[in-house]
Image: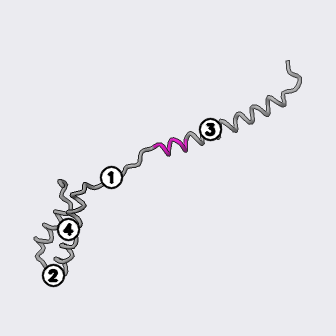
Amino acid sequence: MLENTLPIASFNGDFDRLNAERAQIESELANLAKPINVVAPHPKAVARHLKNVPDLSAMARGGESTSEAAKAIRTLWRASP
């Protein structure tokens, strides 16, 4: 039997502290490992947007009919490229 338990108590304290630190690091790593959702538009969609936005601006300045403006807005958000 050991006459003095001081080294064991010190070890247990270090062990508990290190376990808590490990749990915190594992939690941080788990958060870093989560995938980031990045959505990139289709290249044709970008080109279509770049063309239609100035057209909409011109319509707004020129007083185009609302049906033409609505059609231009729909082409901005059309799903197919």
Determine which residue is flagged by label 3. 22
Q: Nearer the viewer, residue 46 or 15?
A: 46
Tag 3: amino acid: Arg
Tag 4: amino acid: Lys
Q: Earlier in the sequence, mark 2 or mark 4?
A: 4
Tag 2: amino acid: Gly
Tag 1: amino acid: Val
| Percent position of residue 69, x then y | 15, 71
Q: Which residues are magenta?
A: 27-33
Report, in whole angstroms, how far the alpha carbon at label 1 lies from the one at label 2.
Answer: 34 Å
Residue 53 is covered by the magenta coloring: no
Q: Earlier in the sequence, mark 1 or mark 3?
A: 3
Quarter of the rendering occupied by the C terminus: bottom left
Determine which residue is flagged by label 2. 62
Report, in whole angstroms, how far the alpha carbon at label 2 lies from the one at label 3.
Answer: 65 Å
Q: Nearer the viewer, residue 46 or 20?
A: 46
Which residue lies at the image location 50% right of the left edge and 45% below the top edge? 31
Give the image quarter of residue 10.
Answer: top right
Circle nearer the viewer, 2 or 4: 4
Residue 32 is covered by the magenta coloring: yes
Report, in whole angstroms, how far the alpha carbon at label 1 lies from the one at label 3.
Answer: 34 Å
Residue most extreme to the bottom: 62
Within 10 Å of the Cα at label 1, are there few (<14), some (14-19), or many (20+) other Cα atoms?
few
Report, in whole angstroms, how far the alpha carbon at label 2 lies from the one at label 4.
Answer: 17 Å
Q: Earlier in the sequence, mark 4 or mark 1?
A: 1
Q: Earlier in the sequence, mark 1 or mark 2?
A: 1
Within 10 Å of the Cα at label 4, are there few (<14), some (14-19), or many (20+) other Cα atoms?
few
SS for tag 2?
A: helix
Which residue lies at the image location 16% right of the left edge and 63% below the top edge? 75
